[in-house]
Amino acid sequence: MANYCEGLLKLKGRQEDVFTFLTNEVHVYDINDIVIDSAININKTSSKIILNKAAHIEGTERNLLEPATIYVDKDVNGNSCIALNFKAAWKVYNEPYIKFSKKYHIDIKIDAFEKDTEFSRHILIENGELKKDIEKHYDNYIWDCIMPNLGG
């Protein structure tokens, strides 16, 4: 069984682009690898996203979004910023997220923590360009890590 890095996946950009990314790249599958359409509901009118089950992020190595209801605010320029509970088996690879950022014109930030092997990962991608990718290991994980109870 995999250890999971857990934390947040943040998306920032035009609200329509954020919704398009979620619609095209985030899916829930049944036991036969068939997409369950009803598991993710994006209501563009009320700006609400409902994930009824853990959802796989396409093109990643077992990266998931956790079930949640998220209300998405939009600023006067039509931009939104959302934070989704996130899990990745073993570690997070930045390559798929760089592609997503370029394809959907969104900025992506990942902060993930893994308490068993005591590391954190911080990734920032803006305009399709990797700005930060830091994997940090700790001498005293519980004391020094900002989210030491996540992951495992």
Image (cartoon, rainbow, N blue to C red):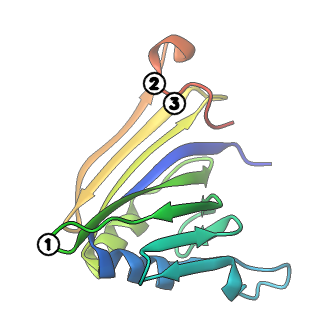
Where does residue 89 sit, x and y in percent of width and height?
64, 52
Helix, strand or loop status at disc 1 = loop
Give the mark toward the camera: 3 or 2. Answer: 2
Categorize mark 2 by other alpha carbons within 10 Å: few (<14), some (14-19), many (20+).
few
**Residue linked to disc 1:** 77
Q: Distance between the residues labelled 3 and 2?
A: 11 Å
Q: Residue at x 49, y 83 (%)?
A: 23
* 128 and 147: which is toward the camera: 147
Among numbered discs 1 and 3, the one appearing first in the sequence: 1
Q: Is residue 92 left or right of residue 131?
A: right
Residue 146: mark in rendering: 2
Give the camera-side residue of 139 and 144.
144
Callout 2: SS: loop
Amino acid tagged 1: Asn
Q: How crowded is mark 3: few (under 14 residues within 10 Å), some or many (20 or more)?
A: many
Q: Which of marks 3 and 2 is nearer the N terminus?
A: 3
Q: Where is residue 147 in the image (x, y as percent from the top left)?
A: 51, 28
The label shown at residue 119 is 3
**Could you say which quadrant of the image residue 81 lies in?**
bottom left
Q: Residue 17 location in percent, x, y?
A: 31, 80
Query: In the figure, 131 relative to 37: above or below?
Result: above
Asked if residue 23 is positioned above or below residue 56 in the image, the reply reads below
Residue pictured at 64% horizontal, 69% vertical = 55
Inter-mark Cα distance, 2 to 1: 33 Å
What residue is drawn where x is 80% and y is 80%? 30
- Between discs 2 and 1, the one toward the N terminus: 1
